[in-house]
Amino acid sequence: MLTRRVIPCLDVHDGQVTRGVQFGRAEDGRLQSVGDPIALALRYNDQGADEMVFFDITASAHGRRSMIDVIERAGDCCFMPLTVGGGIRTVDDMGMMLKAGADKVSINSSALTNPDLIRAGAEKYGSQCIVVSIDAKRVQPDRWEVFSAGGRNSTGLEAVAWAERAVTLGAGEIVLNSIDADGTKSGFDLIITRRISESVGVPVVASGGAGTLDHLAEVLLIGRADAVLAASIFHFGTYTVRQVKEHLARLNIPVRMQ
């Protein structure tokens, strides 16, 4: 059995890591500041993270330059693979991030607007570099739809169908973000995670809802995810990456230990 990956995620806004809940901001309209992205990346690198995801939530010209700087600096001091997403709209944008030191690029709304971007990116850089991130929300008891624009707009697309199409176009990995569970620490959405994991032939990374060690184990065992992505439990010191891996290993879930 392939080892399961543990992946911290850093949402970067104006050069600082921030955190929200259910894709939103606090009641005062602010995002909670967490710290410096390079300091956090080094911490997780030392803890044995399998990968690191940087997500540019500024997604502007200024944010792009700031994110390139973050990726270059992280690449110089970290040995784990780096994925970057947010505001990547063209093949040239992909190339810019890969040249800066990213191993993969993650696309979301831009893939929905222009699905051919998945194919074009895969043809130029290889499917292993192209991650399609899907923001899914339960809209009926047995229906999950894909949302765009940071979880604000429903596309009307059914989540499993969009994941299957993305893989057909060339995506080498799917990151499934549960809007309902994001930042709540109440557990992953196991149902839609399993449906997508069983429907596509590429790795699926589960995101949204990590609160306890058992939540992480459940989405790997019951949700059939290939990897878990989390933010708050790592940023605020609830658990270390190593503690997560030790717990998974005790449950006979294969993980890579340093």
Image (tube, rainbow, N blue to C red):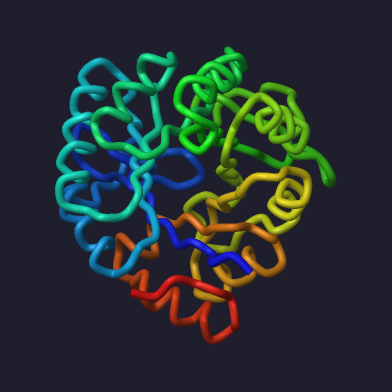
Q: Position of residue 57 (x, y in %)?
A: 35, 31
Q: Is residue 93 shown above or below 106? A: above
Q: Is residue 9 above or below residue 127?
A: below
Q: Residue at x 71, y 51 (%)?
A: 197
For the point 31% across and 28% down, the residue is: 97
Above or below, 115 relative to 221: above
Q: Nearer the viewer, residue 132 or 167?
A: 167
Q: Nearer the viewer, residue 241 or 48?
A: 48
Q: Quadrant of the N terminus?
A: bottom right
Q: Nearer the viewer, residue 61 or 91?
A: 91
- Residue name at image x 72 percent, y 67 percent: 222
Provide residue 162's location: percent of width, then percent of height: 71, 30
Residue 254 coordinates in the image, percent (x, y): 55, 74
Looking at this view, name the residue that lies furthest to the bottom.
Answer: 250
The count of marks equals 0
Q: Position of residue 43 (x, y in %)?
A: 22, 63
164 relative position to 28: left or right: right
Q: Quadrant of residue 8?
A: bottom left
User: Is the residue 42 above or below the residue 140 in the image?
Assistant: below
Quarter where residue 84 is shown = top left
Quarter of the image with the C terminus is bottom left
Identify the image quadrant of residue 221: bottom right
Q: Is residue 94 left or right of residue 16?
A: right
